[in-house]
Each structure stands twice: as C-alpha cells, then as structure tokens.
Amino acid sequence: MGIHLYQQHHHYAERKERNVENGHTPAFSRTEMTELVVPGDSNQLGNILGGRLMHWIDLAAAITAARHAGHVSVTASMDSLEFLHPVKVGQVVRLIAQVNWVGRTSMEIGVDVYREDLPANDVKKTSTAYLTFVALNDDGEPIPVPRLILETEDEIARFHQAEQRRKLRLAHRHKL
Ligand SMILES: CC(C)(COP(=O)(O)OP(=O)(O)OC[C@H]1O[C@@H](n2cnc3c(N)ncnc32)[C@H](O)[C@@H]1OP(=O)(O)O)[C@@H](O)C(=O)NCCC(=O)NCCS
C-alpha cells in the first residue's frame, strides 16, 4: 500500500514537472506502435495495402494528439505520402509519432514509418507522414491545446520545419 501510494505520488510529481505552465514536451505524448503484416493487410502480391498503412499512421498520430491535448482530436489534414520501400506479409511495421508543432487549437504530428525484416535484422524507413489534428471539446468545437516545450535541437528544427509546412497547407486550404 505504502509503495503504491509512493508510486502514485511519484507519477503525479513527474507529470507536474513535465507540465510546465500547462505545456508538454514531445516526449510526453510520443507514441510507438508495432504491427505484424498479415495476409488480410495485403494485396495479391503480398505487399501491404497503402490504405492499411495510412490507417495505422492516422491511429498513431491520433493517440499522440489526444495525449498532448488531453482531448479527443480529429484529423484536419494529411500531407502527401510516399512509400519508399515495399512492405511484405510477415514483416513488421514500426510507427513513431510525435508532436512537431502546436498552434492555438491545432497540432502537427509527424509519423516516421519503419519496415523491419526480423530474420534479416534489416530496418528501413519507408515513409514520413505529417498530419494536422485539431482538439475538440465535448460540443465538437476546436479548443486550445497545451503549448509545446522544446528541449532538444532536433525538436526545435522540427518545429521550424513544421511552421513552413503549415504556411503551405493554409495556402492550399484557402485555394480549396
Ligand atoms: C478540422 C476542423 C475541426 C476545423 O474546423 P474549423 O471550423 O475550420 O476551425 P478553425 O478554422 O478554427 O480551425 C481550427 C484550427 O485548425 C487549423 N486547420 C483547419 N483546417 C486545416 C487544414 N486543412 N490544414 C491545417 N490546419 C488546419 C486552423 O488553422 C486552426 O489552427 P489554430 O487554431 O492552431 O490556429 C473541421 O474542418 C472538421 O471538423 N473537419 C473534419 C475532421 C474530421 O472529421 N476528420 C476525420 C476524417 S474525415
């Protein structure tokens, strides 16, 4: 019981420490998802279907967005996506999603996708996806998200690159 209480307190203190001025680091919400490709995921050639991979990308990003926002978040957009290497039945797909940028109610989530061939111990990056999620309240209206606390050079670089992509996205949306 004593240990349990101590752990609870420890977790609370850790969360509080990370939640500086109502913000979170990218590490707070980073999500790693691992899937084994089975025949139901593939076409006649045994290659994974693009749509199945997009579904996993969307899920990993949705979990990350909801963790950061503390609210359910919806996909507003997904940038263009390239599949650099085929992924076959029996191989493993590893997805790593993290928040790159936050605005007022929206967040850019970057998802890196890796293909692992376990017997050959061969790992290749197959895609990088960028998605914009918007946090919604219980009435389905956009609500402000916690700020993003950047701790590393890589996180700062990702933030600036995401800002550029956002400009292009909003210009594209305006055209639509
Ligand atoms: C996403 C959605 C909530 C935005 O609603 P909206 O009335 O346009 O809200 P706003 O104009 O206030 O935009 C909210 C934020 O989203 C951003 N945004 C909206 N559409 C965007 C897009 N296509 N790309 C990038 N950012 C976008 C805005 O810039 C704004 O960001 P900020 O608050 O960080 O500055 C609304 O379009 C929606 O519900 N879309 C459907 C989402 C959905 O159901 N997805 C599941 C798959 S269909």
Image: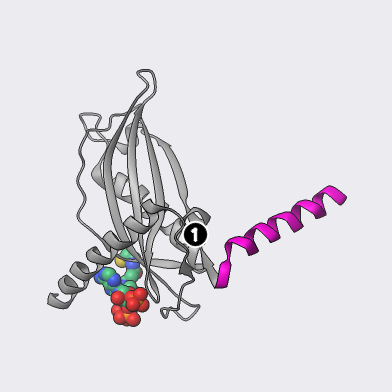
Q: Residue furthest right?
A: 2
Q: Which residue corresponds to the image point at 25% horizontal and 41% vertical from the top-left?
A: 49
| Disc 1 residue type (three-letter) | Thr
Q: Which residue corresponds to the image point at 20% horizontal and 29% vertical from the top-left?
A: 45
Q: Is 31 on the left-hand or right-hand side of 37?
A: right
Vertical arrangement, residue 93 with respect to residue 132, above or below: above
Rendered image quadrant of residue 104: bottom left
Secondary element at tag 1: loop
Q: Which residue corresponds to the image point at 19% horizontal and 46% vertical from the top-left?
A: 82
Q: Is 24 on the left-hand or right-hand side of 116?
A: right
| Range drawn in magenta | 1-21
- Residue 15: say if magenta: yes
Q: Residue furthest top?
A: 119
Residue 78, percent across and down?
A: 26, 60
Vertical arrangement, residue 35 with respect to residue 3, above or below: above
Q: Nearer the viewer, residue 159 or 36?
A: 159
Residue 170, percent across and down?
A: 21, 73
| Residue 46 makes an appearance in the image | yes
Q: Is 96 on the left-hand or right-hand side of 9?
A: left
Residue labelled with disc 1: 25
Q: Nearer the viewer, residue 136 or 127?
A: 127
Q: Which residue corresponds to the image point at 40% horizontal and 75% vertical from the top-left?
A: 105
- Residue 37: say if magenta: no
